[in-house]
Image (cartoon, rainbow, N blue to C red):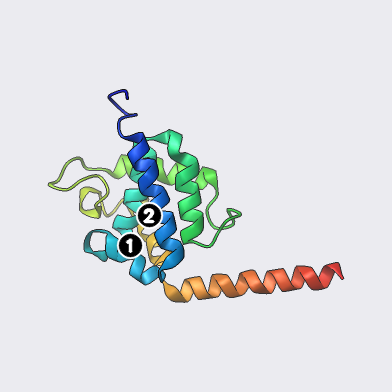
Amino acid sequence: MKLGIFYYEGAFQAHLTLLRAIAALVPRSSFLHIFPKYCPGCAVLEILSILCIHPILENDVNALLGELLLDTHGDILNRNDIRQIAIMIRQAYKGYQGTYMGCCTAYDWKSQGYKTAYTIGVLFSSDQFCELRAWVWVWVSVSIDMHEE
């Protein structure tokens, strides 16, 4: 394994896969319990920090965020949006503040990157948001089925 930005790539890929599996099994509000301070910002910052460090894991990050937002088609966040948000959070990173890159205290809270990441976390950690997304998905599916007949 090479040192540098590709170091631990496999471990991060396994971590993203595990997070995706957990997200499918637990209520979104419970999903946050595995992140520092149960913080929605920390959750998204950790996920996007992996993308900053290992751009080759873009598909894994997109799949995880799609799972969390019940957004498999990229209606809420598409690949380019995620890439741009990752760039913004990288710019908002203040450097080591006694915490690692996936913790919100290491970021400029006034930056657009942090605010966007936090908002995404608040959305997917809301059980009400997920219920609404599921209801909309069922409604759209039924509407399409009715229209095809």
Residue 89 is situated, as x and y percent measured from the top left of the image, at 34, 45
Q: State the image quarter where residue 19 is shown.
A: bottom left
Residue name at image x 55 percent, y 59 percent: 71
Rendered position, 17 above or below 27 = above
In the image: residue 149, left or right of residue 40: right
Residue 128 is situated, as x and y percent measured from the top left of the image, at 46, 76
Residue 76 appears in the picture as rendered: yes
- The residue at which mark 2 appears reads as 117
Residue 88 is situated, as x and y percent measured from the top left of the image, at 38, 43
Rendered position, 5 above or below 88 = above
Residue extending furthest right?
149
Disc 2 crowd rating (10 Å Cα; few below 14, some 14-19, many 20+) is many
Residue 59 is situated, as x and y percent measured from the top left of the image, at 50, 42
Rendered position, 74 above or below 54 = below
**Looking at the picture, which amino acid does disc 1 mark?**
Pro
**Which image quarter is the N terminus in?**
top left
- The residue at which mark 1 appears reads as 40
Residue 123 appears in the picture as rendered: no
Of residues 35 and 118, the one drawn nearer to the viewer in this rendering: 35
In the image: residue 75, left or right of residue 91: right
Distance from disc 2 to disc 1, alpha carbons, whole Å, reads 8 Å
Residue name at image x 27 percent, y 59 percent: 35
In the image: residue 100, left or right of residue 2: left
**Looking at the picture, which amino acid does disc 2 mark?**
Ala
Residue name at image x 53 percent, y 45 percent: 79
Of residues 15 and 107, the one drawn nearer to the viewer in this rendering: 15
* Label 1 element class: helix
